[in-house]
Amino acid sequence: MKNTPAPILLTLLTLLTLLALLVPVTVRAETCEDLIKMDGLFTKARTECGFSYYAWRFQQDSQVCMEKYGKTASKVLFVKGQQAFDSKASEMGKEALCKKLLRDFPMTVKR
C-alpha cells in the first residue's frame, strides 16, 4: 500500500470500520455469567425502583447467554443477581441504590 493515494486509503479504512460495526457482536463466554447476574439485578431493580425502561438489548444479550449456559445454571446466576440487589439495597438503602443504578447505567434503566 506504499503507492496507494491517501484518499483511497482513507476510504478503505472507513469501509473496514463500518464493516466492523455491522458485524454482529457475539457475547463472549467470560462475560456471560456477569451478564446474566446483571440481568437478574436489573430485573429486580425494575420492579423495586419503579423503572419504566430496561434496555431490550441488554435483556436480549442475557437471553443469548442463558441459551449457552442452560436453564438450571442460568437460573442460579439470575437469582444471584437478584440477591445482589437485595444485599446492596439493605447495605446502602433501596432508594440510594436505585439512584446509583440510574446514574451508573443511564442507557440501561430509566424512570
Image: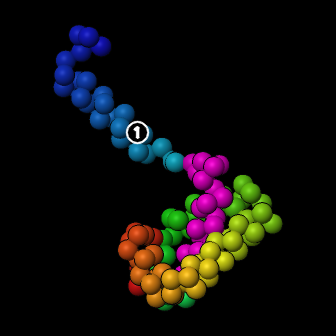
Q: Give residue 56's position: percent from left, percent from top.
A: 51, 70
Residue under the point 65% across and 49% down: 29
Magenta-colored span:
26-46
Q: Classify the position of the C terminus by image quarter.
A: bottom left
- State the quadrant of the N terminus: top left
Rendered image quadrant of residue 75: bottom right
Residue 24 shown left or right of residue 34 in the figure: left
Which residue occupies 75% across, 69% down? Answer: 76
Amino acid, disc 1 = Leu
Q: Relative to residue 4, is residue 7 depicted above or below?
A: below
Residue 100 as seen in the image, left or right of residue 59: left
Residue 88 lies in the magenta-colored region: no
Q: Nearer the viewer, residue 111 or 86?
A: 86
Instruction: Name above or below for residue 66 compared with residue 102.
Output: above
Q: Residue reaching furthest front?
A: 91
Percent x, y of residue 64? 64, 58
Residue drawn at x 64%, y 72% is 81
Q: Relative to residue 96, is residue 15 drawn left or right?
A: left
> In percent of the image, x 56 and y 78: which residue is there?
88
Q: Position of residue 31 (x, y in %)?
A: 60, 53
Question: Which residue is the site of mark 1?
Answer: 19
Query: Which residue is at the far top?
Result: 3
Could one spot residue 71 in this view of the protein?
no
Image height of 101 relative to 18, above or below: below
Q: Where does residue 48 sit, x and y in percent of width and height?
A: 55, 88
Q: Residue 67's quadrant in the figure?
A: bottom right
Most frequent secondary structure within the magenta stretch? helix
User: Is the residue 7 above or below the residue 70 in the image?
Assistant: above
